[in-house]
Image: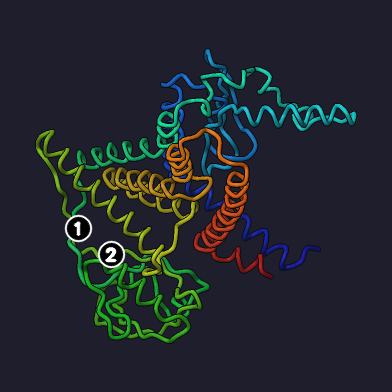
Amino acid sequence: RRSRRDLSANVGLEDVAGKFASNSAGWLLISLAVAFHEGGHFYTALSQSMRIKEYAIGFGPKVLSRKGGERNITYSLRALPFGGFVSFPSVRGAEEDEREEEESNAKGELSSKDRSGDEEDDDMKFESDDPDLLENRPIPQQVLVALGGILANLMIGYFACIGAALGGIPDPILADGIVIQGVDPTGSASKAGLEKDDVVLRVGDIRIPAQDGVKAFVNEIGSKPEETIELSIRKHGEGEPITKAVTPNKDGRIMVQVKPNVAEMNRKTADDVGGVLNLASSEYNRLLYDIVDGYSSVVKGSSKAEFAGPLSMAQMGSNTVSTGDVAETFLFFAALNLNLAAANALPIPGLDGARVVSLLALALYGKREIPEKAQQTIEIVTEISGLLLVILVANVLFADIGRVVPSLPALLKN
């Protein structure tokens, strides 16, 4: 007979699978944004006649794969829809494979390529000085390929804003306070009796303003971890305000999702092409400013905001699509692309920003080859930074699961 813990764990895993399936519209939007990003790298390389090994959407095992075209490029769809990549043949990679194969043959063993049965590299023979290899191209051309994904997302983001402008840009009239959009049953807010559609008017003595109310609420709650705070709320937005006491956890959270308090929804529309483009540009600039400001606040530590992981983004995307508001869906897709562009612009190893910085440093250094000691230092820093990035991504994903399926993290800790 299975234990209660086993049954609970199965329920938690079923919840994850259910959430994943129910958010299929959101996953489709994320996959499209990733496809455009990787398509930017792909196009900038292809337009410069560079050798390309593979264009992939997702990570992990291949689900679908085909090879085609004059350049014999592999196109693949992979099991985990959390990203994607464009891979290029490399002199260093070929030399390492050749060295491993020689060592394996000397020992009478199979190389890793033989064990995997991967014969893709055999179809892509090249010389070390092949001018069509990415690493043999001039620095400006390599920089263009590195920036291709970011530029593609910025462009698609603008086109999405045009789509929203054609349908009418949402122009809400806001009232004081914020609206509870969702309540985690394991958090302090749930224990205090807060429910979906409740309106929070004050946090302690601080009034929540109509403009930037969400930021004010998050920052005020976040500034008082493990302290009891009185909230002034209006149940379901009706009746006289009442008081509820909550205690944020050690991370300064009461486990709720909130949104602005919209009193009335208007639409900004335009009658001609020029007006549509002006509306789109205005909304594009607003989204871009909010995203850059959000990243800046997190880096400076002046905000308690958290990075939303892929599960939360998929959930938000599906919720937006389910409203049937085409303009809102276009705006979400615009924000998704701009967020992807901003994240990849960060100078963190493994992201496009770091690649651009390294190429610019190489250009300023003025030589193709960096001294061996400097190269070793760079490799060590890159490995450490890459490990930290993996840890960060794992933490974001775990927190993400906790927000979408609150029961699972608790089960994993037991």
Give the answer, above or below, for where 196 lies relative to 120: below
The three-letter amino acid code for the residue at tag 2 is Pro
Across and down, in percent, residue 133 comes to 54, 23
Would residue 169 be found to the left or right of residue 79 on screen?
left
Q: Nearer the viewer, residue 35 or 128?
A: 128
Q: Which residue ends up furthest to the right in the rendered image?
A: 108
Residue 117 visible in the displayed image: yes
Q: Which residue ends up furthest to the left in the rendered image?
A: 271
Residue at 57%, 25% in the rendered image: 53
Residue 31 visible in the displayed image: no
Question: Is the residue marked by circle 1 packed among few (<14), some (14-19), or many (20+) residues within 10 Å?
Answer: some
Q: Secondary structure at mark 2?
A: strand
Residue picked out by circle 1: 172
Question: Is the residue marked by circle 2 packed among few (<14), some (14-19), or many (20+) residues within 10 Å?
Answer: many
Q: Are marks 2 and 1 in contact (CB under 8 Å)?
A: yes
Residue at 34%, 48% in the rendered image: 335
Across and down, in percent, residue 117 comes to 75, 26
Across and down, in percent, residue 147 comes to 40, 37
Q: Secondary structure at mark 1?
A: strand
Residue picked out by circle 2: 260
- The N terminus lies in which quarter of the figure? bottom right
Residue at 54%, 65% in the rendered image: 406
Across and down, in percent, residue 409 comes to 60, 65
Give the answer, above or below, for where 400 lies relative to 269: below
The three-letter amino acid code for the residue at tag 1 is Pro
Would residue 150 be found to the left or right of residue 406 on screen?
left
- The C terminus lies in which quarter of the figure? bottom right
Residue at 20%, 41% in the rendered image: 165
Q: Which mark, residue 327?
A: none
The image quadrant of residue 175 is: bottom left
Q: Nearer the viewer, residue 112 or 243?
A: 112
